[in-house]
Amino acid sequence: MHTKILTRLGDNLVVHVTNNMKDNGTSVHWHGVRQLNANEFDGVPGVTQCPIAPGQTFTYRFQATQYGSTWYHSHFSLQYADGLYGSLVINGPATADYDEDLGTLFLSDWAHEPVAEMWELTRKKGAPSLQNGLINGTNTFDCSKSPDPSCIGNGTKFETVFERGRKYRIGLINAATNGHFQFSIDGHNITVIANDLVPIVPYETQSVLINIGQRYDIVVEANAEPGDYWLRGGWQSECSANDNPDNITGIVRYDANSTALPTTIGIKVGDHCGDEPLESLVPYLALDVGSHDTIIEEEIGIAINGYLLWTINSSSLYLNWSDPTSMRVYNHENIFPTDYNILSVEASSLC
């Protein structure tokens, strides 16, 4: 599911989601979108809504108060890892000029088994090394490396065509379950113009570090010698393992009729899980948010005791799909504090 939703800054979105699955509930989360006065449409089952039952329809309603490239995805169990997601593009001003918008480009890791079938092993032994990665939902794979008898290996590389002298906008999205990428295009520099729906002062770089769930809007100028170039989702091996990290590639062509495989050489891929340098990520609109001296230290961990449990400072949270937490808060139920980990704060502290 890679259906694109295109809208404009200030538009009111009304999205009807029908669950046609036979046995599973579902929900849709609008990643990074501020749900001001629309909390019930954030799409997190057990927090803001009950899952959408099979055969039922739920309507999401919210206003686009930010702009740039982002995505929507299922927030129910493991569904998005099998591809239940798509792009959400909110048009607004750009901080650098470009000639053509090529749309969004998804980077993801990929397993050849349904993720639900892998869960039993994962919860006992931790996250496995996935077999491959995808560029916009497609890639090739050598089936001689797979014990799966149903592997047929008929995939294709993602391709796009550049015209020399033109500037192209691309919305990068990391939709992986366990993969961090260092995106690059051989022979081309990248101008970064937005990060996670925040327009930034443009900066030029050879590559972009993009972690799980992050989004970057970039502009690439087609100023290389005409030819065929590898587009690379460089795998960050320090963060997690992949069986074919060097195969997560697409192709940029200057001739739409070319079928040749590129022979270009890419940059050296790092081996860390960091973000882009903080000093590079400067919001285009400067806002004075004051200063605060309080430092909060948190320790994030994973407990494996028959199942996986994410914790912050050894604490997790309880979700009841049939009784969403935000509704319990709205009804003034006494859940402060309990396993729900809801904290009561003074309204003045939020101003």
Image (cartoon, helix red, strand yellow):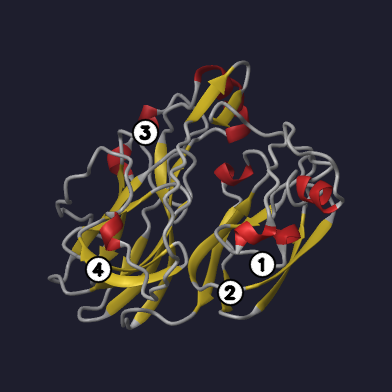
Please tell me which of labels 3 and 2 falls first in the chain: 2
Element class at badge 3: loop
Q: Quadrant of the N terminus?
A: bottom right
Look at the image and tell me whether residue 121 can be seen: no
How far separated are the C-alphas under marks 1 and 3? 39 Å
Marks 3,4: beta carbons within 8 A: no
Element class at badge 4: strand
Judge from the rendering whether residue 184 lies leftward or rightward of residue 330; answer left or right: left
* Residue positioned 33% across, 40% down in the render: 273
Q: Toward the viewer: 14 or 303? A: 303
Up-down: is 286 above or below 298? below
How far separated are the C-alphas under marks 1 and 4? 30 Å
Q: Please name the residue that numbered disc 4 is placed on.
A: 203
Q: Toward the viewer: 1 or 97? A: 97
How crowded pointer 4 is (Cα within 10 Å; few <14, some 14-19, many 20+) is rated as: some
Please tell me which of labels 1 and 4 falls first in the chain: 1
Kind of residue sitting beneath label 4: Tyr
* Closer to the eye: label 1 or 4: 1
Q: Where does residue 57 sit, x and y in percent of width and height?
A: 82, 58
Please tell me which of labels 1 and 2 falls first in the chain: 1
How crowded pointer 2 is (Cα within 10 Å; few <14, some 14-19, many 20+) is rated as: some
Kind of residue sitting beneath label 3: Asn
In the rendered structure, find residue 242 and report the number of the disc placed on it. 3
Look at the image and tell me whether residue 105 can be seen: yes
In the rendered structure, find residue 36 and report the number of the disc placed on it. 1
Q: Where does residue 304 sit, x and y in percent of width and height?
A: 56, 19
Q: Please name the residue that numbered disc 2 is placed on.
A: 65
Q: Where does residue 175 sit, x and y in percent of width and height?
A: 48, 50
Judge from the rendering whether residue 166 lies leftward or rightward of residue 80; answer left or right: left
How crowded pointer 1 is (Cα within 10 Å; few <14, some 14-19, many 20+) is rated as: few
Marks 1,2: beta carbons within 8 A: yes
Please tell me which of labels 4 and 2 falls first in the chain: 2
